[in-house]
Structures are given as C-alpha cells and as structure tokens.
C-alpha cells in the first residue's frame, strides 16, 4: 500500500488520567501496543501499574492484571491502601502463558498487565521460567496476541545490578515501548523515562512522588527540587535543564577540599564522572584555578540526573565557588556548554529555560553570548548576562553582584 493511502486512527490513543504517565507515552496508551517497564525491586512498578489499571477500569475498560509474584490477597491489600476497587479490574494469579491467553480472550479485555514477564512459562519448553528461552518465547506470543486482538499489553521486567533490563536483548526489540522507572529507596520521588517509543518521542520524563496513597504526579518539578536549597552556600548554583519538552531547575552542589592523599579524589552523583574530569581540566587550564591538589565532589540535589551539555557552565562555576568559598547570587541561573578551549557555546531551548527561571522569581541569567546575538527574547524580570569564555563567566558570577571582581 502506498504510504499516502494509509489512514491513521487518532482514537487509538487512550489517556489513562495519570498526567505524568501519559506525558512519557506522548499522550497515553496506544491500542494494540506492547510496553515493557523495568526498574529496581521495591521502586513502585506494581503500584504504578495498579493505579494505571484502576484509571483505565474507571473508563469502562476491562483490565486483566496477571500477577506471577503475588497472590490475589496481596494485590487486594495494596489496592485497599491505594483506595482502588473497580469491578472492571480483574486480578489473575497465573504463570502459565496459555492459561493467561485463554483468560484474556474469554474476558475480551482491553488491557493486559503482566507482572512480571520473568515468571511466565510456556508449556512444551523445558527451560525454567525466567530463562532466556522462556522469556523470549513468552514475549513473542504475547506480542502476537496484542497485535491480533488489539489488546494493549504492559509487561514488568526485572533489572540487573547495573539497572539494565534482565533477559535477552530481543525482549527490548519485540516491544513497542520500553520505560524505565527509577529512583532511590530513601527518597520519595520517582522518575519515569522512555528508552524506546515507537508511538512517540523518547525525550519526555514523568516525575512522581511516593506517598501513602500511592504515586502522585509532580506537575511543578522545579519547585520540588529547589524547595530545600540553601541560598548562601558556596558551591551551590541553579541550572535549568531540559527533561523532554519541559524545563526543570535543579541545584548543583560542589565541594572542594584539600586532598590528603597523593591522587586527588573526583566523585560525582547524578552526573557523568568522565565529563566532570574533562570540565575540571578546562577550569584549571583555561580558568587558571589550581585544582591539582584538591578533592572535588559534585552532587545533583534531590537525586536528579543531569546529562546535557547545557549544565557544563553551572558545574564549573559551582566548583569555582566552592574552591574560593564565595557563594553565587541566589537569584541567578547559569546556562552554557563548555568547549575545550574554554569558550561558552550556545544551548538549545534557552527561551523556555529562562521563562521557567522567571516564573520562579530568578532575576539574573548567565548565558552564552552567541544566544544573545541570535536575537534571544529575554523574559520580563530576567537580566541576561552574556559571557563568551570561562574567564569572563567566573568574573561575572563570583561574587554574585556581577561587577567583574577577580577570584
């Protein structure tokens, strides 16, 4: 068929009602799609999917929740804590693939949730459940079921020690969407990211907070991550980063101390350590700030992970602030990518970043001069301070009055 003759069906997209979940899926669940969600044990995958199932059931959808790791009573207890009790949500404790397929067909369900794919087994195959053969064959059969009958299927997958999905790599190739549910057990917030999405983009992120009543979407993540920041602490800066299509303001914290050993320590939490080492070399060489005998520690507050180059300048200024023990102005945000020559390179979506900073009351923004030369529309209430290289950025950011004082 010619591609011009193919008709799309906009009604095939179903919103679950969980805004952050729908955001990651680019608008909701696609009918007949297969989704794989992975995450460490106890992070809240079952809780999230139970809430998704309840929201769908409230829309007169039939949901079959297959639990291979818990009994009906255990799932019912969790549902009771979450206040869920929809008659259209069916709990089925089973690991036999053929029985699951028969039950899904008999109920004529709209959505099938399998928790987890590693517990299923296909009769006739000798390997035990969870083996490469069983996982691959069970996933393939479920994929054919969801495509032929138009059943939206969500699979829960185990993860390895390094956080990657366990099982054969073909599992990720079979499914339409791969989601990663991340977070730290000692913190209340969780991040939902799309690693693969055949029906949307993979740049969106959903942010949830775990509470006694389940997972709640955080509609304003910037305020959430900045709620406990210290305004006068040296080494702390605010950087607007892009998580998908929305800007999020996060706090970067640096600590620089004299090294007690021959080789100085370099540690990073929430940021790539190799990239940090490159940035420190640029700071020492181009910024003339001696760090050879100092231990440097970097932390992204709140457990957030930052991986975009637009945070480079904020990281260097945070390290310099900690090294000279001078705080950066608390009403300033810092944006910019660093080149090896010490130049400040332009970043994308800078107007959205500045708009978020202005909304939260920030007054100054240190940003690349190239962005200003391209006719940047600076939001009202923000004073843009353009910089071209790392030396100029250090002079204008430390101290916070931006009068060009030397370090």
Image (cartoon, rainbow, N blue to C red):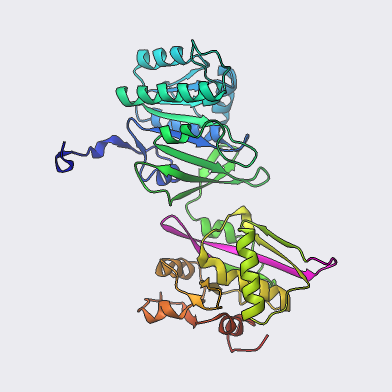
Q: Residue 219: horizontal and vertical position, in percent?
A: 47, 52
**How many labels sit on residues?**
0
Q: Main secondary structure of the magenta part?
A: strand
Of residue 5 and residue 75, the one placed in the foreground of this image is: 5
| 213 or 133: nearer the viewer | 133
Q: Nearer the viewer, residue 71 or 80?
A: 71
Q: Residue at x 85, y 67 (%)?
A: 260
Say which residue appears at 55% left-offset and 36% top-offset: 165
Answer with the quarter of the image where residue 131 lies.
top right
Residue pushed farthest top?
124
Q: Residue at x 56, y 58 (%)?
A: 306
Range of magenta residues: 239-263
Which is nearer the eye, 252 or 225?
Answer: 252
Give residue 223's position: percent from left, percent from top: 54, 59
The C terminus appears in which quarter of the rendering? bottom right
Residue 58, quarter of the rendered image: top left
The reply, left or right, for residue 170 in relation to residue 303 is left
Q: Is residue 91 above or below residue 234?
A: above
Above or below for 332 versus 271: below
Q: Is residue 254 magenta?
A: yes
- Residue 116 visible, this angle: no
Report whether residue 302 is seen: yes
Residue 56, position as x, y percentages in the image: 39, 31
């Amino acid at each position: 068929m010619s591609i011009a003759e193919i008709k799309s069906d906009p009604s095939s997209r179903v919103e679950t009602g969980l805004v952050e979940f729908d955001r990651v899926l680019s608008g909701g669940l696609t009918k007949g799609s297969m989704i794989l969600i992975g995450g460490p044990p106890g992070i809240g995958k079952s809780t999230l999917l139970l809430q998704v199932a309840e929201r769908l059931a409230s829309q007169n959808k039939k949901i079959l929740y297959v639990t291979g790791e818990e009994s009906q009573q255990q799932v019912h207890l969790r549902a009771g804590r979450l206040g869920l009790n929809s008659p259209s949500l069916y709990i089925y404790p089973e690991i036999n693939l053929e029985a699951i397929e028969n039950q899904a067909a008999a109920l004529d369900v709209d959505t099938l949730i399998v928790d987890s794919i590693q517990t299923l087994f296909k009769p006739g195959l000798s390997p035990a459940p969870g083996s490469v053969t069983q996982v691959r064959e069970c996933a393939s059969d479920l994929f054919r079921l969801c495509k032929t009958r138009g059943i939206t299927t969500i699979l829960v997958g185990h993860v390895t020690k390094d956080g990657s999905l366990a099982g054969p790599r073909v599992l990720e190739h079979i499914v339409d969407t791969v989601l990663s549910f991340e977070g730290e057990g000692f913190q209340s917030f969780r991040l939902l990211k799309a690693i693969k999405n055949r029906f949307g983009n993979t740049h969106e992120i959903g942010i949830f907070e775990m509470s006694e009543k389940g997972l709640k979407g955080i509609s304003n993540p910037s305020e959430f991550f900045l709620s406990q920041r210290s305004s006068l602490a040296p080494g702390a800066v605010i950087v607007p980063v892009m998580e998908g299509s929305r800007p999020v303001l996060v706090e970067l914290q640096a600590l620089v101390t004299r090294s007690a050993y021959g080789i100085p320590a370099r540690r990073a939490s929430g940021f790539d350590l190799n990239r940090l080492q490159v940035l420190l070399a640029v700071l020492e060489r181009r910024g003339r700030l001696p760090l050879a005998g100092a231990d440097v520690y970097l932390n992204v507050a709140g457990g957030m992970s930052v991986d975009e180059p637009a945070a480079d300048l904020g990281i260097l200024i945070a390290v310099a602030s900690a090294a000279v023990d001078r705080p950066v102005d608390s009403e300033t945000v810092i944006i910019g990518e660093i080149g090896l020559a010490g130049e400040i390179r332009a970043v994308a979506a800078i107007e959205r970043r500045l708009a978020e900073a202005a909304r939260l009351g920030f007054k100054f923004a240190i940003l690349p001069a190239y962005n200003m030369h391209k006719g940047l529309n600076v939001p009202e209430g923000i004073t843009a301070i353009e910089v071209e290289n790392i030396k100029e950025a250090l002079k204008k950011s430390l101290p916070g009055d931006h009068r060009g004082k030397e370090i």
